Amino acid sequence: MLDYLMNTWWAIPLMIFFARILDVSIGTIRLIFISKGMKNYAPILGFFEVLIWLLAVKKVMTDVANPITYIAYAGGFATGTYVGMWVEEKVTTGKVLIRVITKQFDVLTTELIENNYPFTAVDGQGKHGEVKIFFLVVNKHQIKELMDLIKKITPAAFYTIEDVRYARENPELLMNKKKISPFFGFFRKDK
């Protein structure tokens, strides 16, 4: 009798909870891969996501009378969503577009050049006068370092960060690192 109670009230709900964490985490990562165009990994993750989900649902349906299985199922879903986003953050794959709008463009231009960040800057007009709009496409793992630099130099700057699905680098623009332009980052030296 004690084994039956342990299985019904603790073991089965715990299995359901952890199965849901696993399948929802996989599902979150799968969706992120789809949005980034990583077509080869998404179907494999989808297979395991659904397989684990089916096993969890089977356990819930087998033990319909136990309300703890419902709580475990829902709790596993919520926790799995968080875990999936945390894992994606740690994997840091892909590129992002950082758009910075600032009035302190001379200082920012100099710092970006000195720190070897390729960028494009265009003139803009804001409510309080002239601004520059900087566009930087960088690897996701560079966000913190770059944002620390931008916040240190131009604390009042407005910025946005967006995921980039595809980015094509032009090797000709990146070849000559001696000459740097505020437009397109690096430019080829014409002879």
Image (cartoon, rainbow, N blue to C red):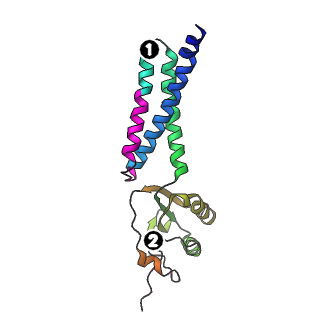
Left or right, 74 with respect to 40, comes to right
Query: Residue 184: x, y in percent?
Result: 44, 74
| Secondary structure predominantly adopted by residues drawn in magenta | helix
Query: Is disc 1 surrounded by few (<14), some (14 to 19) or many (20+) residues within 10 Å?
Result: few
Q: Residue at x 46, y 59 (%)?
A: 95
Q: Quadrant of the C terminus?
A: bottom left
The residue furthest bottom is 191
Mark 1 — residue? 64
What's the residue type where badge 2 is placed? Thr
Query: Residue 124: x, y in percent?
Result: 44, 68
From this view, report whether residue 49 is shown above or below residue 117: above
Q: Residue at x 61, y 64 (%)?
A: 149
Q: Nearer the viewer, residue 182 or 66?
A: 66
SS type, badge 2: strand
Label 1 to label 2: alpha-carbon separation: 59 Å
SS type, badge 1: loop
Mark 2 — residue? 120
User: Can residue 43 be found in the magenta stretch?
Assistant: yes
Query: Is disc 2 surrounded by few (<14), some (14 to 19) or many (20+) residues within 10 Å?
Result: some
Query: Residue 103: x, y in percent?
Result: 53, 68
Q: Quadrant of the N terminus?
A: top right
Number of numbered discs visible in the structure rendering: 2
What's the residue type where badge 1 is placed? Val
Q: Which of the 4 quarters of the picture holds residue 116?
A: bottom right
Q: Nearer the viewer, residue 126 or 71?
A: 71
Left or right, 154 with respect to 42, comes to right
Q: Residue at x 53, y 70 (%)?
A: 117
From this view, report whether residue 158 is shown above or below residue 123: above
Query: Residue 19: x, y in percent?
Result: 49, 30
Q: Which residues are magenta?
A: 35-54
